Structures are given as structure tokens and as C-alpha cells.
Image (spheres, grey):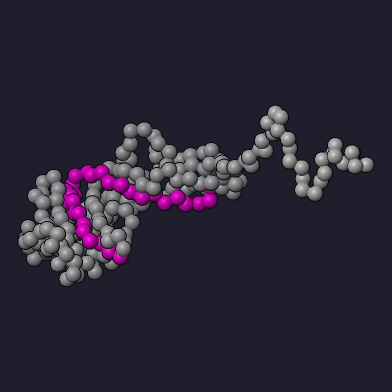
Amino acid sequence: METLEIQANAREKAGKKQSRRLRRSGKIPAILYGPKTEAVSLELDRKDFSSRVALLEGSHLVRLKSSAPTLAEKVALVKDMQFHPISGEVIHADLYEVDLAARIQVDVPLRFVGKAAGVVRGGILQPIVREIEVECLPLDIPGFFNVDVSALDIGDSIHVDEIQMPEDVTAVYESNFAVVTVVTPTVEEAPEAEAPAEGEEVAAVEGEEPKEEAEEKD
């Protein structure tokens, strides 16, 4: 996996008020933490981070570039991002420091490719999950997995153990769950007309005289 370099500086002050000031000045408040790292409040360049990291799919590693010796060259996984509900801009980021020699568990997106045979016959392709958890070294994290659905007929499924992975990447799961299937389209049946209750007369069609009355007029 490619490691993206981003500029990061330590924040002396934290809190909502300081975070708002940072955002107004074109920065993103962030935090760096890890199993062997004491949490450190950071500020990131919003334009740089948003254009190079925030819009990427899947898990990504970043290498910190900083004038502070305690931060420089640290490698971290972008663990979480918070977005503004209206503008969609990143307003906070969580960075998880990793040891490049230690395996970690991350989520990897699935891309379903091909046209399923069952879809050609009228079925519906139904993804069950959009990502799966794997364990690997940080630099071996896949950007995504291609899942070829071409052979799926109606009722068929692809399970997690059928996804092809690099040798050093292992899927993490307790049961061999399905990730995608082709289902039969549901057709709603028209409701049946209810029979009249016993003793209930059936309304005559407009303009049509009841049979008994018509016979009396003849």
C-alpha cells in the first residue's frame, strides 16, 4: 500500500472553541493515538488532507511530516473521519499509529465486477456486505478486492472464503458468511376480490336492471 505524506503539527490547545478557530483558518483538528502512543492533538492542512486522503476508498496509511521530532516520520492509519453534515467537508480525523512490522486488522472494500448469469435471467444482484475485515502488515493492506459475480445464477452466492487474497492477507471471520447473492425478483400478486357475505346482495352494474324486475316489465 502506498503511504501518503501529510503535514501535521501538534496543537497546544484542544476543545471545541479552538477547533472552530482551526477550521476557520483552513486547518483540520485531529488526534494521533495508538497502543504505544500517548494521544496527541494535531492540526492538519485541510486542503491537502481533503484532496489527497479524505476522498480515497478503503483504509490508508499516512506518514507525518512535521517540524516536531516526536511526530516526524510517524506512520498512521486513517482510522476515522468526521464530515460536516451540510458541506461534506472533513471536520476531524483520527489517526492510529502503526508498527510497520506488526500485523493489524482493517476493513477492505469489495468491488463486484461482471454481470451475473442470474441477472441476465431476470434475477437481482444483492450485495450483502460492502467490505470485509482482514489481517495483514500495514504496508500490505489491499485497496480493495474485486469479486467476480459473472458465474452467479439465481440462488447462488459467493462466500468470504472464496475471495482471492494475497498470500500475506487473511480474512477475519467466525463463520463463512455470504458477501453477495442473486435473488429471485419479488412479484406482488393482485389482491383477490372478496366474495359477498351470505345474505349480502351484489350491486347491479350501473344502467342494468335486476333480472327479476326486467321480467316483470315484459
What residue do we see at 19% from left, 63% from top? 28
Q: How many marks?
A: 0
Q: Nearer the viewer, residue 134 or 14?
A: 14
Q: Which residues are magenta?
A: 87-116
Quarter of the figure with the C terminus: top right
Residue 90, image x and y in percent?
25, 62
**In the rendered view of the protein, which quadrant contains the N terminus?**
bottom left
Identify the residue at image location x=23%, y=51%: 79
**Residue closest to the eye, 30 or 158:** 30
* As drawn, 155 above or below 81: above
Q: Is residue 10 visible?
A: no
**Position of residue 48 measured from the top left corner of the image (x, y, whole percent):** 23, 68
Query: What residue do we see at 53% from left, 38% from top?
Result: 155
Q: Is residue 198 magenta?
A: no
Q: Is residue 217 above or below residue 82?
A: above
| Closer to the camera in the image, 119 or 22 | 22
Rendered location of residue 11, percent (x, y):
9, 61
Q: Judge whether residue 95 is colored magenta.
A: yes
Figure quadrant of residue 50: bottom left
Residue 175 visible at all? yes
148 sits left or right of 47 in the view: right
Q: Position of residue 148 (x, y in %)?
A: 47, 48
The furthest residue to the right? 218
Residue at (87%, 41%) from the top-left corner?
A: 214
Q: Is residue 169 left or right of residue 36?
A: right
- 197 vs 60, left or right, is right
Q: Name the magenta segment's main secondary structure.
A: strand
Q: Which corner quadrant of the image does residue 118 belong to? A: top right
